[in-house]
Image: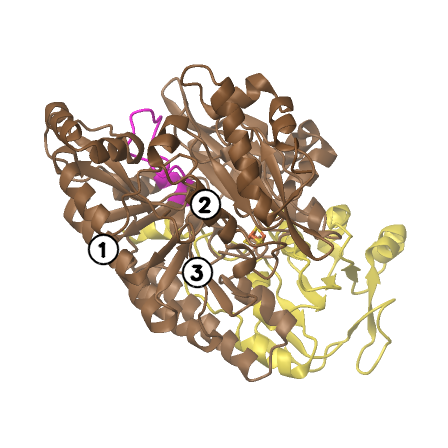
Amino acid sequence: MQALIKDGQRVFDDPWFISGLEDRGKPATQPLVPIAQFLDQHQEWTDSDAVIGVWLSEDDMPDALEPYLDRLDIIALHLPKFADGRAFSKARLLRQRFGFQGEIRLTGDFLPDQAAYYARCGVNAFACRTEEEADIAVALLAPFSVHYQSDAHQATLFERRHEAR
Amino acid sequence: MYRYDAYDQRLVDERVAQFREQTQRFLDGKLAGDEFLPLRLQNGLYIQRHAPMLRIAIPYGLLSATQLRKIADLSDQFDKGYAHFTTRQNVQFNWPALEDVPEILAGLAEVQMHAIQTSGNCIRNTTTDQFAGVLRDEIADPRPWCELIRQWSTLHPEFAFLPRKFKIAVNGSPETDRAAVRFHDIGLEMVNQDGEIGFRVFVGGGLGRTPLVGQKVCSFLPAQHLLTYLDAILRVYNLNGRRDNKYKARIKILVKALGVDVFRERVEAEWAHLKDGPGTLTTEEIERVATHFVDPDYAVLDDADELLATQQKEFPGFKRWMDRNVQWHKKAGYAAVTLSLKKVGYAPGDCTSAQMRDAAALAEQYSFSELRVSHNQNLILADVRQDALFELWQAAKASGFATPNIGTLNDVICCPGGDYCALANAKSIPIAEAIQAQFDDLDYVHDLGDLDLNISGCMNACGHHHIGNIGVLGVDKKGEEFYQISLGGDSGLNARVGKILGPSFKAIEVVEVITRIIDVFVEQRHDNEPFIDAVERLGLTPFKERVYASTH
Ligand code: SF4
């Protein structure tokens, strides 16, 4: 996996690759395992002291991961088509409802222009399609300085409006 | 009306900058056409048959004279000097150049306007009754709630890539539904329960290919929970709505597939997590927004009955106009006036820049500098003194706004159709014009009473043909334009989808068919019976028999 952005910065030495979708290339050494495989083998994984990463396809829901979240380091949401917006809700569930503290990474087909909305939903790492798009996405991460709604990072604008009074 | 503060303004300005950068990247070849598409649609920009089309939001139909004048200026500068008011209380430019769109948006931002989410698979402009706040039959003014929904939905990070477009409407009156809430993805009806304001919530209504009436998912939602409840519905839809077939992707299909009870359970389960969380409205915020919608500075007046009676006696044309185009007002001595944008020879909803400036001037002189756009594609001056009506009538006549046809067969509702729209099966504007030309005897049309005739150029139903008392739908038969006619649709509290009469007709037959339908009505009508009631009473058979007697 290349073309990576993490917490707003470009990253060039990331170890993760998507098991079942990608080949283990250099410097990739850590497999992100499919959620079904992880759930099957969760005992072995959680008993070990391995660093654990799981990936979800567009149809996988994150709910079943809830009991194991504090043992997971990274959850990848994989998008086959950028128009499929389910991952926005999944990221919010993971971050805001289940309180997942680790990395939420977006992989697959998405536009640099969508990164800002995903970031507001709690995604903090983006494996972009190309190096060029990763550079564009870094620049487009926060096109707005005000937001009406609450999100993974801030309160609603109306709450801030009233505090400002 | 709502006035932006520094936050609202900054957001709209930043949206212009964002779109300018996206357009530039597309023009530089760094953004593929199919990837620019959802981005430009989220800003109201279509690429149409002849040119791009830009849809500008008029939130819940409310417009200031200054804003209307700006639209007129922009239409002169960047378009052909006219604009088209739509059935969803928006306004469209039909010929802007792509390169100019960022400039148009910057111009709109100067007068607190934008094109955010006027298209695309996201939450669209919230609509309401064009007479909100001025009629006597309201539980409460729906406009503050529309504005709260506007802010909540604007650039909502979670719901910008829904399975399909999403439309919300709010109705404030218990007696009539002038916002057609049962035909929206979410319809909100205001309820007063023992002094507490809240909403009855309908989900899954809609027109288009599979017309359905919305189903009730909540009988009373206390007002402060409005936004978290909407979040819950949208999340259930975003995660579960179909994405494999765009004709099955609207929320109505999900509600139908799950059944309303299971759908409600899912929403309630989701809402249990969101209720009382961030987004729960505070009294302070509700009041902040509501203060933008307090009554204007009305004079203390009596109703001008005598004066109006004298004027109407002397000028029968004024009487006819008053009968159709003037509505009673909650405030004594005032009235709400509809300026008709339906005139024989002009496409319904079209307005030239000169007319827009005239309308802006009339608003300034007679109605506290505000206007409304109705879903019937007309403009409304909501707060006119009754003793100024006669003067206004003359001024409106001079500007071509006084056709006394509101709510009649002549007040045709019509989408842009095959003349402008790339999706069309058939033209709609020439059909509207032919019908208006046939029924141009306004005395006759008046006697027919209330009658909605709606025309759509294809199944997408932008002209809302399903809920027209008479509906006309353009269909394609082996490359030829045909029209399907339906009867008995109703957008009000008795929400109903019209029934198709039978095989479709060629363009040149449509006027004759409508004429025969009207003939049957006139012959069989009881005293002053509205058309819709007569159709209900008589059923389709007599109409069918007459219409298909010899044309086929
Ligand atoms: S109904 Fe069809 S033809 Fe008419 S505007 Fe909508 S998409 Fe275009």
Tell me the magenta residue range: B128-148
Which chain did the image draw in brown? Answer: B
Secondary structure of the residue carrying tag 1 is helix
The amino acid pointed to by label 1 is Asp
Q: Closer to the camera, B50 or B205? A: B50
Disc with the residue nearer the chain's start (2 vs 1): 2
Chain A appears what colour?
yellow
Mark 3 beta carbon near ligand 1 (under 8 Å): no
- Residue B32 image position (x, y, % from top left): 63, 76
Q: Closer to the camera, B231 or B533? A: B533
Q: Residues within 10 Å of mark 3 (few under 14, many from 20)?
A: many
The amino acid pointed to by label 3 is Ala
Query: How far is mark 3 from mark 2, CA to CA?
Result: 13 Å
* Above or below for B466 versus B539: below
- Residue annotated with mark 3: B115
Disc with the residue nearer the chain's start (3 vs 2): 3
Q: Residues within 10 Å of mark 2 (few under 14, many from 20)?
A: many
Residue contact between numbered discs 2 and 1, judged by CB atoms under 8 Å = no
Label 2 vs label 1, nearer the camera: 1
